[in-house]
Amino acid sequence: MDALERMTFNALPAQTTDDYRMRQYLQMPNQVYVSAGDYDFSYCERLSNVFGTHTGWYCCLVNMHQGWAKYATHLWYATPDNGLAALVYGPGRVTARVGKGVPVTIDEETVYPFENIINLILTLPESTRFPLELRIPVWCDEAAISLNGIRLQAEKGNRMVRIERVWNNNDKLTIEFPMRVKTTNWGRNSRTIERGPLVYALKVGEKWEKKMDPDLGEYYDIYPTTPWNYGIARAVVDDPEKNTTVTEKAISGNFYWNQSNAPFEIRLSGRKIPDWELVRGVPYQPVTKRYGEYQGEVDDTEETITLIPYGCTKLRIVAFPVVR
């Protein structure tokens, strides 16, 4: 389920335009150039990397809209002993029969993954005993669980927590998942910045150009307008909480997963790597040596770079070399 959230909140929103009319068939984590061409993918035709309506296999065009709907309809699961289990999280409502067949409605109030608090409000015709199981994500060091404002328990991550009790009408169960900035190891000993269920990516300026294919119609190329060839400072890897700054802005009513609406930014120190260039449209990953740092030429000037959630990007660097 951690993998499901990771895909849903990162890769899924990054592969469509805001109006959901165009999508990208093949997506790269480190993607700083989107254009027609031949790429070193196992399957690739020349428009697989662009944002278009008819590019790539048509089955993805008609199926891509199912992603969010299927996620939302699979937040809750029945347990074998007439209870309910919350395996993934998001705003919604579930109605089911629990215990000895008593109907319950649970309203899940949250803007997760853009906040760390989830409120579950129960509506019951009568007090009823049944089990409620909650998944604590693997990235969470310790979750706090409260009932009607009174703390019940703290639980470590990467487990299911079972709360079996008599539940009353209007009970409010609150789950708090502290989100800390962490780094994870990706390919070629690169490092990625993560916070909670979100992966963060370098904010790269975008220039969109509309193109026309005689057979497949309109599509968009996207080109970078700002530098992208950065490595992140060793200090960030050693102590990401201390050496990053997280800023948050309010989510607008008409939220879209794009640069303008990104609700979080993470700022940290990085340096340009002059030799890191595109090869046939792909920013092949420089190797960070086993002992922890890229050994090639690095700019002397340290810069502050800005990262936003992966899902809010079309161009990005996610897997960073580590520089001294």
Image: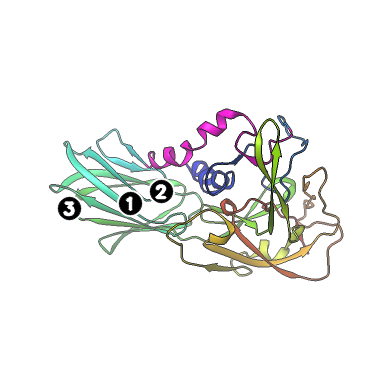
Q: Identify the residue at horizontal 77%, vertical 51% (top origin).
A: 290
Q: Identify the residue at horizontal 42%, vertical 45% (top origin).
A: 88
Name which of mark 3 and mark 2 comes first in the sequence: 2
Q: Which residue is mark 2?
A: 89
- Quote the CA–CA distance across marks 3 and 2: 22 Å
As drawn, the label of residue 281 is: none
Q: Nearer the viewer, residue 33 or 40?
A: 33
The residues colored magenta run 46-75
Which quarter shows the C terminus?
bottom right
Disc 2 element: loop
* Three-letter residue code for mark 1: Glu
Q: Are marks 1 and 3 in contact (CB under 8 Å)?
A: no
Disc 3 element: loop
Mark 1 surroundings: few (<14), some (14-19) or many (≥20) residues within 10 A? many
As drawn, the label of residue 108 is: 1
Q: Nearer the viewer, residue 104 or 59?
A: 59
Name which of mark 2 and mark 1 comes first in the sequence: 2
Q: Identify the residue at horizontal 51%, vertical 56% (top origin).
A: 196
